[in-house]
Amino acid sequence: MRPWTGVITDEEEQRYASAGFGGEGGFGADPALLIIDVQYRTIGTAPKPYWEAIEEYPTSCGDVGWDAVDRIVPLLATFRNKGFPVLHPHVAPKNAETDGGRLAQKIPSIMGIDAKGYEFVSEVAPVAGDVLLPKKHPSAFFGTPLTSHLIDFGVDTLVVTGCTTSGCVRSSVTDAFALNFKVIVPEDCVYDRAPTSHAVNLWDMNGKYADVLPSSHVIEVLEGLESAS
């Protein structure tokens, strides 16, 4: 069973296969972990079903976000144990006078998040040595020094986690692919408020831009790599 099983039709699968999509990009020797927007504003301060979670933060994805956090925890521990870089692209608190732009015009609810909502979820919060990357747009690359950090670290592979699958994750994946990084998306470490969009975007990214794999497999590969010097 894949995350898109029952959502993508057999014919659609065949169309991608006949075009040659869905090959393996593989892992390099020097990975980095992106944890995108894993803040309380995207999951709530406690696990709750979606319709309850949005009573606290309308931008919350609910308990699917907490499920993903549970899977990010051991993946993050592996990165830390191996000494591989960890980076946290995130949305910083909004200044209502200057940070509106097209996104606020399109989605006004993002302008009303309180300070707690912008805090990193404690289970996967940054520690000393992690890189913090405030961003104002979906891609972790747009308007940030992410590429510079990755070059400095000598990274060849990005493992992308966080949210949303159809938004900031996908935007970051396609930019990473365009910059010639190998890209891995642990399928149980990303989340979205819309299950169909989540499934379709995982399927499409797997076909074109990334290897979408269970986090257990990603951890197994990482453990077989030589630790960072």
Image (cartoon, rainbow, N blue to C red):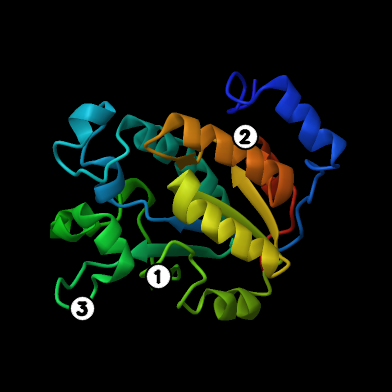
Which label belongs to residue 185? none
Q: Amino acid at mark 3?
A: Thr
| Residue 149 location (% of width, % of height) | 56, 77
The answer, for residue 81, to whether it is visible in the render is no
Among numbered discs 1 and 3, the one appearing first in the sequence: 3
Query: Residue at the spot x=74%, y=29% of the render?
Result: 13
The answer, for residue 148, to whether it is visible in the render is yes
Among numbered discs 2 and 1, the one appearing first in the sequence: 1
User: Quarter holding the N terminus?
Assistant: top right
| Residue 146 location (% of width, % of height) | 52, 74
Residue at the spot of label 1: 132
Q: Quadrant of residue 108?
A: bottom left
Secondary structure under badge 2?
A: loop
Q: Say if 52 sits above or below 129 in the image.
A: above
Which label belongs to residue 98? 3
Residue at the spot of label 2: 214
Mark 2 or 3, which is nearer the eye?
3
Instruction: Answer left or right for 8 relative to 10.
Output: left
Mark 1 or 3, which is nearer the eye?
3
Q: Say if 22 sits above or below 4 in the image.
A: below
Among numbered discs 2 and 3, the one appearing first in the sequence: 3
Q: Amino acid at mark 1?
A: Leu
Q: Amino acid at mark 2?
A: Pro
Cα distance between the residues tagged 1 and 3: 21 Å
